[in-house]
Image (cartoon, grey):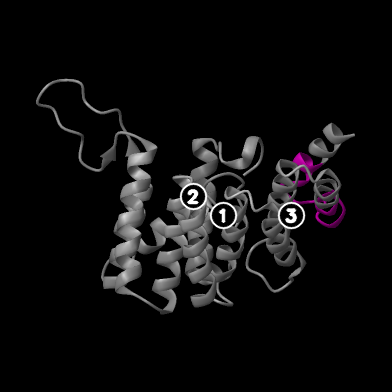
């Protein structure tokens, strides 16, 4: 969440924040931290895994939990010894894991064409597509999640996901518009400071230096106590 695209997290930090996100999902007091990069919200994925795993008596939750377990599965190199197969529950590469995740979440999405489970399945489906670099497919999944989950945790997170999916297609103007609108909201479950950091990252990638600077400055001015504030200041200092 902090430096270097915010997806290189230390193990202990990841565990602590994943537990925090799980609590937020459970209590429906939604305050997730945004992540820059290919996967929209790794912490939401981890938090969802712990939450749904604890509700295995419910069929929908069981299906989501199983898909999330795949998305969180260990990456283990393929065996080189003849006759030895891949260890159960592991995948030989991040790509193989993401492809398996897509299949699993698509199965849930097909089984639940509406409602909270449908929105969650499509949100996670979007993250899996982004991990594969498939911006078009991710945008579609996030768009469906945003519609189904309007006004809920997954609906709001899907709007952030849409911004990243559009950026993945090099549709930077649309991505900036989507995230700018999200950052202007005060009723969203997604922390505005996190949205601003993602907005600034995409603006820089698109060569929109002035807009990136403005987004970083909003973080430092409006959210001085944010966990993003120091990074925002550092980014501003490198921009002159």
Q: Report the magenta residues as a range.
A: 217-232
Q: Mark 3 or mark 1, which is nearer to you?
A: 1
Residue depicted at 21% across the width and 25% down the height: 79
In the rendered image, which residue does mark 1 sit on? Answer: 165
Residue 63 in magenta?
Answer: no
Q: Residue at x 70, y 65 (%)?
A: 182
- The reply to whether the magenta stretch includes residue 227 is yes
Residue 116 occupies quadrant: bottom left
What numbered label is drawn on residue 142? none
Sequence order check: which comes first, mark 2 or mark 1? 2
* Front tag of 3 and 2: 2
**Depth check: 85 or 165 in front?**
165
Q: State the separation of the CA atoms marked 2 and 1.
A: 7 Å
Earlier residue among tags 3 and 2? 2
- Reading the image, the residue beneath label 2 is 130
- Which structural element holds mark 3? helix
Is any atom of residue 46 visible in this view? Answer: no
Q: Are marks 2 and 1 in contact (CB under 8 Å)?
A: yes
């Amino acid at each position: 969440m902090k430096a270097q695209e915010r997806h290189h997290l230390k193990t202990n930090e990841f565990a602590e924040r994943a537990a925090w996100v799980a609590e937020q999902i459970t209590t429906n007091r939604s305050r997730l931290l945004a992540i820059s990069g290919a996967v929209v919200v790794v912490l939401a994925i981890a938090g969802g895994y712990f939450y749904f795993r604890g509700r295995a008596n419910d069929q929908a939750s069981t299906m989501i939990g199983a898909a999330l377990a795949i998305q969180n599965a260990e990456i283990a190199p393929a065996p080189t010894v003849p006759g030895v197969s891949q260890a159960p529950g592991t995948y030989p590469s991040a790509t193989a894991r993401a492809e398996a995740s897509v299949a699993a979440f698509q199965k849930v999405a097909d089984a639940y064409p509406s409602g909270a489970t449908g929105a969650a399945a499509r949100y996670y489906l979007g993250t899996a597509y982004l991990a594969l670099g498939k911006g078009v497919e991710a945008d579609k999944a996030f768009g469906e999640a945003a519609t189904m989950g309007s006004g809920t945790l997954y609906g709001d997170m899907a709007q952030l996901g849409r911004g990243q999916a559009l950026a993945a297609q090099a549709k930077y103007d649309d991505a900036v518009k989507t995230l700018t609108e999200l950052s202007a909201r005060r009723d969203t479950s997604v922390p505005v400071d996190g949205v601003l950091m993602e907005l600034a990252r995409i603006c820089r990638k698109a060569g929109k230096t002035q807009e990136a600077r403005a987004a970083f400055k909003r973080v430092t001015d409006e959210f001085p106590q944010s966990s993003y504030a120091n990074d925002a200041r550092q980014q501003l200092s490198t921009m002159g």
